[in-house]
Image (cartoon, grey):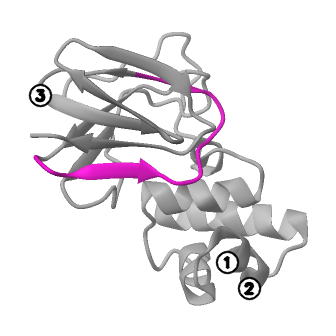
Amino acid sequence: MTSKLGARLRALRQAKGYTVSQTASLAGLSRSFVSMLENGKTSISAERLERLAAVFGLRASDVLPDTSSTSLIQVVRAGTGPRVPNAGPGVEITLLSNDLHRLLQPVIMRLAPGASYVNEVGHAGEELVYVLSGALELRVDTVAVELREGDTAHYPSALRHGYANLG
């Protein structure tokens, strides 16, 4: 997937007429990192991918290689959902759909005790959080709420947002 992602990012950059340096600067990344990514020599975290996609006016899922099928019903069997690489220490994100271009992009996020995940840039769409177990602090923009097992929250994902396991 890394080489396909790199090729896709290069095509987007060239379509915008940006240099590697311009793209890196706009995304807050190093020139060498963007170059290595385009050449399939490194992987990228979910947060960095969101920042890079935002340079092109897209969501991270819009730049990922198309893994969808033409099926009306998307089925991901238990334990087979792809994991997001480099989500962060103590953070595991599993995709629950193979079609990354649908309006709803379900994921399961597991945070180890004390771990946190922040999406600095935000992205198009909305998010729905359902706490399966434990306690979670949800921050959206400047507002923080504590959620416990069985609680839900729904918010616009264009705003900076993040989660912290309070356990």
129 or 5, which is in the foreground?
129
146 horizontally vs 105: left or right = left
User: Residue 68 location, x and y as percent?
Assistant: 54, 31
Q: Amino acid at mark 3?
A: Gly
Q: Amino acid at mark 2?
A: Ser
Instruction: Let me know if residue 81 appears in the view.
Output: no
Q: Which residue is mark 3?
A: 134
Looking at the rendered image, the quarter that the C terminus falls into is: top left
At label 3, counting other C-alpha atoms closer than 10 Å, the crowd grade (few under 14, some 14-19, many 20 or more) is few
Q: Nearer the viewer, mark 1 or mark 3?
A: 3
Q: Secondary structure at mark 2?
A: helix
163 horizontally vs 98: left or right = left
Q: Report if the CB atoms under discs 1 and 3 are less than 8 Å apart.
A: no
Query: Which residue appears at 55% of the width and 75% of the height?
Result: 37
Q: Report if the CB atoms under discs 2 and 3 are less than 8 Å apart.
A: no
| Magenta segment | 113-128
Q: Which residue is mark 2?
A: 21
Cα separation between marks 2 and 1:
5 Å
Q: Earlier in the sequence, mark 2 or mark 3?
A: 2
The circle on residue 121 is none
60 or 70, which is in the foreground?
60
87 horizontally vs 99: left or right = left
